Image: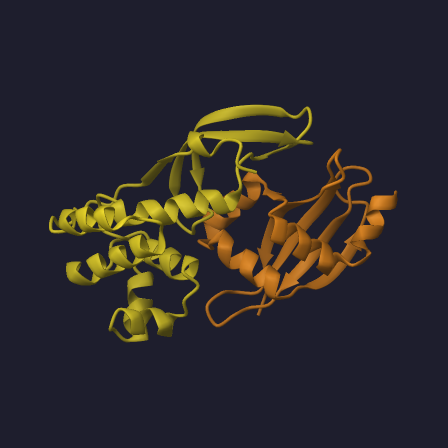
Chain colours: A yellow, B orange
Amino acid sequence: MGDYKREIRDTFTYHGAGFAVVLRRLPMLLLGTEWVFDVKPSAIDRRIFERLPRQASRLTGYQVRFIRIYADMTLKAFAHRFGVSHPAVLKWERAGDSMTNMSWSTEKDIRLFVLSQSESSAQEFQAFYEALTTEANEAVTPLEIDIEELVGVH
Amino acid sequence: MEWLRALSDVESAVADCLMRENYFFSEHFNALLGEYRIARISIVRRLKSGIHNEEYDYSKGHADIPCFCLDIKATHEEPALSLFVAFSRETEGTLMMWIQEFHLKAK
């Protein structure tokens, strides 16, 4: 794009996933009087989706909802995939910014499902599976993503 | 302006911008997503599946920048929205859509 004013924000709280994600080094572009992201929103969402299974803390309700929506699954389809009822999925999602009440084994399954949707090698998948033997911690901390590597993705 | 004719069919213009991902969204839109806890992808998918153009108004925003109010239907999971977008043309002729803000529609 042409001669627009640009800047890099050291930190920016992104809400496009339906929960707060701290983006580091986000390129911004001034259009008229509005600052807008200089990165494709789908690239940001894709990065969030890929990072969620590796999150150190347990998944929150809004994060589970994002995973389901990103995977383009209805409540029923998601429930069927993880062997629960759809009211159970609703209950997880209604936990909002708090961790859900799902068991760690179910959450591991969801994390592995997300990983299976990305381009991971069998080796990466196995290493990730082994890493999941350690349960994620229960302290909810905001997801942080360094976005600099997405610069120039339009 | 010639390029504005492309907007005589705003539904096609929206679909084209979404398909090519030729759109930006404002910080205000980002803040609203946070306030209502709505995922961007949910709005984009509903925009792709159909809109109703409520308003056609060149007078909003900057001079000669057409703005539209688009109605997005509710789903069983998400509320109905009125979405405000503007269009501009890049120097190389690309049509860009700016997603500016939305309001929840009263039931």
**Residue found at x 28% / y 48%:** A121
Q: Is residue B45 positioned above or below B27 on the image? A: below
Q: Is residue A140 positioned above or below B71 on the image? A: above
How many numbered badges does the structure rendering display?
0
Residue A138 visible, this angle? no
Looking at the image, residue A19 sits to the left or right of residue A88; the answer is right
**Residue found at x 64% / y 66%:** B50
Q: Position of residue A69 (x, y in %)?
A: 42, 60
* Residue toward you, B85 or A81: A81
* Residue toward you, A32 or B41: B41
Residue A81 visible, this angle? yes
**From the image, which quarter does the C terminus of chain B lie in?**
bottom right
**From the image, which quarter does the N terminus of chain B lie in?**
top right
Looking at the image, residue B12 sits to the left or right of residue A104; the answer is right
Q: Position of residue A89 (x, y in %)?
A: 31, 68
Q: Position of residue B52 (x, y in %)?
A: 69, 65
Task: Check the image and name the residue furthest to the left.
Answer: A133
Q: Is residue A10 positioned above or below A125 on the image? A: above
Looking at the image, residue A14 sits to the left or right of residue B2; the answer is left
Task: Check the image and name the residue furthest to the right.
Answer: B1
